[in-house]
Amino acid sequence: MKVWMTFNPGCGTARNVLAAIRAKGIEPEVREYLKQPLTADEITALVAKMGVPLKDVVRWKQEKEVAASGITPDSTDAALLGALTDFPVLLNRPIVVTEKGAALCRPAETVNQLL
């Protein structure tokens, strides 16, 4: 099974999801999005595959970056997408993609539905 995921090594949930995937004998393709930010097209494709509104993948707890970007939950998709590309830390994680679908794996156990 091919598995792709966004990853931040400083995130406990992301580390737990990666461990759960590896425990199934799968070595995922890992995208450290803080080092290699996703493009607007990649984010748009992920959100479409997940079937969720763009605002659902924004990490609203990053108050400093949210304030700097000027976005709110009522912002347009264009504004949200701009913020996510300008401030990659705003992308909530981990997002996992498999042949079964794509999902924000918070809590970490959510990944089991995709494996």
Image (tube, rainbow, N blue to C red):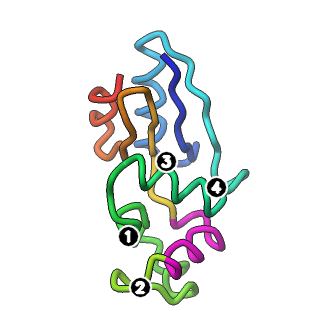
* Sequence-earlier tag: 3 or 2: 3
- Name above or below for residue 68 compared with residue 95: below
The residue tagged 1 is 55
Q: Label 4 is placed on what type of residue?
A: Leu
Q: Residues within 10 Å of mark 3 (few under 14, many from 20)?
A: few
Q: Secondary structure at mark 2?
A: loop
CA gap between label 2 and label 1 equals 8 Å
Q: Secondary structure at mark 3?
A: loop
**Closer mark to the observer between disc 3 and disc 2:** 2
Q: Label 2 is placed on what type of residue?
A: Ser
Q: Mark number for residue 11?
A: 3
Q: In the rendered structure, does residue 88 fall within the stretch colored magenta? A: yes
Q: Residues within 10 Å of mark 2 (few under 14, many from 20)?
A: few
Q: Label 3 is placed on what type of residue?
A: Cys
Residue at point 45% right, 76% down?
77
* Sequence-earlier tag: 2 or 1: 1
Residue at point 40% right, 71% down?
61
Residue 88 x/y as whole percent:
61, 64
Q: Mark number for residue 38?
A: 4
Q: Mark number for residue 64?
A: none
Q: Are marks 3 and 4 in contact (CB under 8 Å)?
A: no
What is the magenta range?
78-90
